Image (cartoon, grey):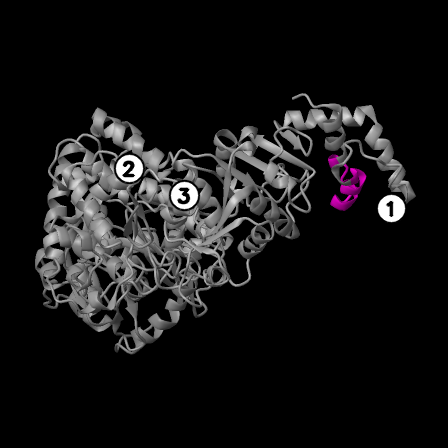
C-alpha cells in the first residue's frame, strides 16, 4: 500500500513542503529511506521503529520504502519522525483516517512521546502562506505556535495521541495568544537608572538609539561600558508584532527560543572576541545557519573589546551594516538572513587600558597604541557614527544618591524622535537618520551658512578627518530631532562634533 | 639651488656612505679648510677602510658625474643642504664639540637663523601632560622657534601645539628623508615642510637607527637657547637631550611630576639638579624677562563665558560636573565645550575631562 503525508523542511528561514511517501511491499524485510536525508533523518528509522512498537502499534515486517520528495532537497533535523511514523501506520493499514491537508512535525522518543523541534514558527508561517491550515506539533512547541493567526494547531503529547486525534478523538487546538499580553509580562533586567554618573555616555546612547546610529564606547576597564551597552535595548522602542515574528523566526531556527515561544524583548547579542566570521555572519556545512548578526536582528550586537576581534570577522560586518541583510552563499545554495541590528562596540583606549587616565599610568608605547587602534579598519570606524569616551568613575559617584533617569523616560523621548524621522523618510524607504545616504543628507540636512562655518572651523581646529563630515551631520540631524527642531542649528553641530574620539583619525 | 665649490665638496663628501662621521670630519681638518684633504689623511683612511675602498671613495669624490648625480637627486627631492660653511648654518651648532658637517633641510631654511627653544619628552607622556606640552609650545612659539624631534607623544604634540598657535617649528630627524620614522607621523612632517623646517644630518637614503637618536639629540639640545623637558623617565632619551643641553651651557627647564611617576621621575631629577621648574608658559617667559602677551581672547558669548569660567575655576573638570554646577542641561554644555575647544580656550583630556588653557 502507498501513503502520502505532508511534512516541512527548512531552507534558511523558509519552510519547504516535503511529501513523505511510504510504500510497503512483500519481499525481503528492509526499511529504506531515500530523498537526500542527512544523518539525523536517517536515524529516524530507529526512533520510528521503537516508537511505533512502544505505542502498542505494529511495525510492519515487510519491505518498506520511504521517499522524501522533492528528492533533490537536502533534508535535515528530526522534524520528520512524526510524518514518517504516521505514513508507515497509514501504509500498513493501521490508520485509515484522512490526513490530507494536515502538516506533521515532531521528533519521536523511543516510547512514542513527541519531543519539541526547532524552527516551528518559520515553517508554520511558510505553510500557512502555502494554504495549509491544520498542523500537528509536539506539545513543547505549543507556545511558539500560538501566535499565528488563521491556523489550527494541535499540540500533542505522543504518537498514540496523534493516532487518537486522527481517528476522531476530541482535542482542543492551541489557544491563540496575544503578543501585547506576552510583551507586557516581560521586562529587561537592566535599567539606565542603575548606571551611576556617565551622563555624557547616557546622552550619547539616547542619540544613538534615537537615530539608529552605531556607537563606540571607549574607556578604561571597569567603567561600566558593558552595563551601558546592556541598557540599549531598554531605551529602544518596543518591537511590533511583525518585528517580533521576524526575530522569533531566526531564534526558532537556531533553537534558541525560550519557553514563552516568541521573542518579545529586543535581542542583545554578545559574541566573544574569538568569534569567527562564520559564527558572526552565518554559514556552515549542510543547512546554512544564521550568524550572530542575524540573531541580533532588530536588537543590539555588542562587540566588547572591538580591536580584539579578528580583522576578517570585523570586515565581514561592513556589508550587512550597509544592507541590513546578509546573503550567505555556500556550495549548497545561498540563503538571505535579515541583519538589521544596532552595533555597539567597546574598546579600551590602549592595550593596557590606562591611556588618558588622570590617575593610572599607561605602560603602552605609542606604537602599541597605534597598532591596537588600527586593528579596526577605517571603513568600519566610518560606519560607527558616535564615538564616546566613558568617564573614569570615582568612588564618590558610585555612592552618590541622586535620581538618575529611568530607561522608560529616555525611551519616551526616543520614540518621539523616531516618529519625526518616520514621517520625514516616508517616501525614502528608510526609517532612521543613520541610514541616510549622501543624497538624502543633501536633501534633509541642509546647513545654514552659520552651521557650515562652524563645521568648517571644527574640522580645522579639532583635526577631524574628512570622512567624519557626514557622520557629524547625521548625528546633528538626530540631535535636532530630539530637540524637535526642524533645521539643524549650531549647537546641534557642536554637540555632534563632541561625540568623536580625537585619537582615532 | 646653487652651491659654491666648497659647499659642493662637503655635500659630496657627506653623500659618501662608506665614510663614518669621524672620517668625514678628519677630512675637513676640523673645519679649518673647506676642501677635503684626502692626501693628508691617507694613512688614517687606508687603515680604517682598506686601500681598495679608499681608492674607490677618492675616485668617487672627484668623479664629475657622481657629483652631478648627488646634487640632482637632492634637488629632485626638494632637499636643501646647509653646510658648515653656509650662511644659514646656525651659530648655536658651531659652538659644540661635534657639529654636524651638513644639515639636510626641507622647508623654510631661514628658521635656522632664528632664536630657538627646544621641547622634548617621552613618547609615553600622559594625556594631561601632553595638553600642557601643546599649550606651552603654543606660547613659546610667540617668542621662539620651537625645536623638537618627531616621535609620537611629547615631541609631536609640541610641534603640533606650536603650529596650531601659528608659530614656527623645526623638527630634527634621526634618519634620512627617504623613510621617515615613525611612519604614522608622516602627515605632521608634511605639514612642517610647508609651515616650518625639517632637518637631519643624515643623507636621504640612510634609515633611522636606534643609535641615531642619541646623536640626533645633541642637535636638538644645541639649537635651543633653552630646553624644556616635558616628561622623562629616569632613563630616557629626553634626559640625554637634557644632559647635552647642560653640557652646552643651555638653560634647562622641566615640568615637575609626582614622585616615582614613570614618565616624570627624570623631570624631578633635573629639577633637583638645578633645572628651572616650569608649571606654565609664564615661568619660561619670566626667566628670560620677556613679556608674555596672552593671545587676544576671542569674543565669547555669555554661555561660553560661564562654562569657561567654570572650567577655569576647577582646573580640570568633567562635562557632567560642569553641567551640574551650572545647572544647565548636559547637551547644551557639550555644545559650548566643543565651541570653546575650537576657539582653543580649553583642551580636551581623556575621559570627557576638560581643562582651561
Q: Exactly how many numbered labels are in the figure? A: 3
Secondary structure under tag 2 reads loop
Crowdedness near tag 3: few (<14), some (14–19) or many (≥20) residues, C-alpha within 10 Å: few
Which residue is label 1 attached to? B44
- In the image, the segment drawn in magenta is B14-29
Residues at marks 2 and 1, CA–CA distance in whole angstroms: 61 Å
Chain letter for mark 3, please: B
A97 or A338: nearer the eye?
A: A338
A12 or A153: nearer the eye?
A: A12
Residue A29, placed above or below residue B125? below
Which residue is label 2 attached to? B343
Q: Is residue B313 visible?
A: yes
The reply to whether callout 2 and callout 1 are in contact (CB within 8 Å) is no
Numbered mark located on residue B289 in the image:
3
Secondary structure under tag 3 reads loop
Decide if residue A181 is on the left or right side of residue A128.
left
Crowdedness near tag 2: few (<14), some (14–19) or many (≥20) residues, C-alpha within 10 Å: some
Chain letter for mark 2, please: B
Residue A472, placed above or below residue B286? above
Q: Which quadrant of the figure has residue B66?
A: top right
Residues at marks 1 and 3, CA–CA distance in whole angstroms: 50 Å
Amino acid at each position: 500500500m502507498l501513503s502520502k503525508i505532508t511534512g516541512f523542511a527548512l531552507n534558511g528561514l523558509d519552510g519547504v513542503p516535503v511529501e513523505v511517501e511510504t510504500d510497503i511491499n512483500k519481499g525481503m524485510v528492509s526499511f529504506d529511506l531515500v530523498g537526500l536525508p542527512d544523518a539525523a533523518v536517517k536515524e529516524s528509522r530507529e526512533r520510528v521503529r521503537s516508537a511505533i512498537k512502544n505505542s502498542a502499534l505494529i511495525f510492519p515486517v515487510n519491505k518498506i520504502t520511504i521517499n522524501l520528495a522533492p528528492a533533490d532537497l537536502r533534508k535535515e533535523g528530526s522534524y520528520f519522525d512524526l510524518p514518517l511514523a504516521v505514513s508507515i501506520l497509514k501504509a500498513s493499514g493501521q490508520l485509515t483516517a484522512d490526513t490530507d491537508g494536515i502538516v506533521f512535525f515532531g521528533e519521536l522518543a523511543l516510547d512514542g512521546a513527541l519531543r519539541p523541534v526547532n524552527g516551528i514558527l518559520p515553517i508554520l508561517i511558510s505553510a500557512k502562506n502555502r494554504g495549509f491550515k491544520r498542523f500537528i506539533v509536539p506539545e513543547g512547541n505549543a507556545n511558539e505556535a500560538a501566535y499565528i493567526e488563521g491556523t489550527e494547531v494541535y499540540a500533542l503529547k505522543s504518537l498514540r495521541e496523534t493516532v487518537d486525534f486522527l481517528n476522531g478523538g476530541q482535542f482542543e487546538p492551541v489557544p491563540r495568544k496575544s503578543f501585547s499580553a506576552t510583551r507586557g509580562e516581560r521586562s529587561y533586567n537592566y535599567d539606565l537608572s542603575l548606571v551611576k554618573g556617565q551622563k555624557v555616555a547616557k546622552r550619547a546612547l539616547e542619540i544613538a538609539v534615537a537615530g539608529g546610529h552605531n556607537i563606540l564606547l571607549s574607556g578604561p576597564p571597569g567603567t561600566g561600558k558593558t552595563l551601558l551597552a546592556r541598557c540599549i535595548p531598554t531605551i529602544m522602542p518596543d518591537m511590533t508584532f511583525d518585528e517580533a515574528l521576524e526575530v522569533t523566526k531566526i531564534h526558532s531556527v537556531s533553537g534558541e527560543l525560550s519557553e514563552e515561544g516568541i521573542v518579545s524583548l529586543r535581542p542583545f547579542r554578545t559574541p566573544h572576541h574569538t568569534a569567527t566570521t562564520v559564527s558572526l555572519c552565518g554559514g556552515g556545512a549542510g543547512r546554512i545557519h544564521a550568524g550572530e548578526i542575524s540573531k541580533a536582528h532588530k536588537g543590539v550586537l555588542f562587540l566588547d573589546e572591538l580591536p580584539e576581534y579578528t580583522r576578517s570577522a570585523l570586515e565581514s560586518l561592513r556589508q550587512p551594516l550597509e544592507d541590513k541583510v546578509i546573503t550567505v552563499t555556500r556550495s549548497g545554495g545561498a540563503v538571505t538572513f535579515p541583519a538589521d541590528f544596532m552595533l555597539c562596540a567597546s574598546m579600551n583606549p590602549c592595550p593596557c587600558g590606562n591611556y588618558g587616565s588622570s590617575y593610572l599610568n599607561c605602560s603602552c608605547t605609542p606604537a602599541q597604541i597605534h597598532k591596537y587602534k588600527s586593528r579596526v579598519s577605517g571603513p568600519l570606524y566610518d560606519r560607527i557614527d558616535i564615538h564616546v569616551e566613558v568617564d573614569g568613575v570615582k568612588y564618590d559617584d558610585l555612592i552618590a544618591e541622586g535620581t538618575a533617569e529611568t530607561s522608560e523616560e529616555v525611551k519616551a523621548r526616543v520614540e518621539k524622535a523616531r516618529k519625526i524621522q518616520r514621517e520625514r523618510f516616508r517616501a525614502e524607504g528608510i526609517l532612521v537618520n543613520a541610514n541616510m545616504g549622501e543624497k538624502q543628507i543633501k536633501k534633509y540636512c541642509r546647513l545654514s551658512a552659520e552651521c557650515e562655518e562652524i563645521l568648517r572651523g571644527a574640522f580645522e581646529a579639532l583635526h577631524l578627518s574628512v570622512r567624519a563630515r557626514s557622520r557629524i551631520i547625521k548625528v546633528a540631524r538626530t540631535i535636532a530631532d530630539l530637540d524637535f527642531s526642524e533645521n539643524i542649528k549650531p549647537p546641534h553641530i557642536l554637540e555632534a562634533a563632541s561625540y568623536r574620539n580625537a585619537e582615532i583619525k | 639651488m646653487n652651491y659654491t665649490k666648497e659647499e659642493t665638496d662637503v655635500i659630496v663628501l657627506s653623500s659618501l656612505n662608506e665614510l663614518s662621521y669621524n672620517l668625514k670630519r678628519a677630512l675637513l681638518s676640523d673645519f679649518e679648510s673647506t676642501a677635503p684633504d684626502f692626501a693628508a689623511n691617507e694613512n688614517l683612511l687606508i687603515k680604517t677602510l682598506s686601500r681598495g675602498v679608499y681608492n674607490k671613495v677618492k675616485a668617487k669624490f672627484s668623479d664629475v658625474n657622481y657629483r652631478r648625480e648627488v646634487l640632482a637627486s637632492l634637488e629632485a627631492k626638494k632637499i636643501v643642504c646647509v653646510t658648515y660653511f653656509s650662511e644659514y648654518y646656525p651659530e648655536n651648532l658651531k659652538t659644540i664639540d661635534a657639529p654636524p658637517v651638513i644639515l639636510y633641510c626641507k622647508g623654510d631654511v631661514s628658521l635656522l637663523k632664528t632664536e630657538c627653544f627646544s621641547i622634548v619628552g617621552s613618547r609615553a607622556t600622559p594625556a594631561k601632560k601632553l595638553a600642557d606640552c601643546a599649550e606651552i609650545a603654543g606660547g613659546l612659539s610667540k617668542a621662539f622657534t620651537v625645536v623638537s624631534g618627531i616621535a609620537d607623544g611629547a615631541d609631536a604634540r609640541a610641534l603640533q601645539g606650536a603650529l596650531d598657535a601659528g608659530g614656527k617649528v623645526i623638527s630634527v630627524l634621526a634618519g634620512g628623508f627617504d623613510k621617515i620614522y615613525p611612519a604614522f607621523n608622516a602627515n605632521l612632517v608634511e605639514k612642517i615642510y610647508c609651515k616650518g623646517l625639517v632637518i637631519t644630518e643624515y643623507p636621504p637614503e640612510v634609515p633611522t637607527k636606534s643609535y641615531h637618536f642619541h646623536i640626533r639629540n645633541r642637535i636638538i639640545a644645541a639649537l635651543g637657547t633653552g630646553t624644556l623637558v616635558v616628561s622623562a623617565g629616569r632613563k630616557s632619551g629626553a634626559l640625554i637631550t637634557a644632559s647635552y643641553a647642560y653640557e652646552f651651557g643651555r638653560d634647562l627647564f622641566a615640568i615637575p611630576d609626582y614622585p616615582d611617576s614613570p614618565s616624570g621621575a627624570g623631570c624631578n631629577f633635573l629639577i633637583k639638579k638645578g633645572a628651572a621648574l616650569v608649571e606654565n608658559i609664564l615661568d619660561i617667559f619670566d626667566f628670560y624677562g620677556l613679556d608674555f602677551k596672552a593671545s587676544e581672547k576671542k569674543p565669547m558669548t555669555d554661555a561660553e563665558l560661564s562654562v569657561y569660567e567654570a572650567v577655569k575655576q576647577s582646573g580640570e573638570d568633567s562635562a557632567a560636573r560642569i553641567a551640574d554646577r551650572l545647572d544647565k542641561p548636559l547637551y547644551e554644555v557639550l555644545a559650548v565645550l566643543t565651541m570653546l575647544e575650537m576657539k582653543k580656550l580649553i583642551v580636551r583630556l581623556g575621559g570627557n575631562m576638560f581643562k582651561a588653557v
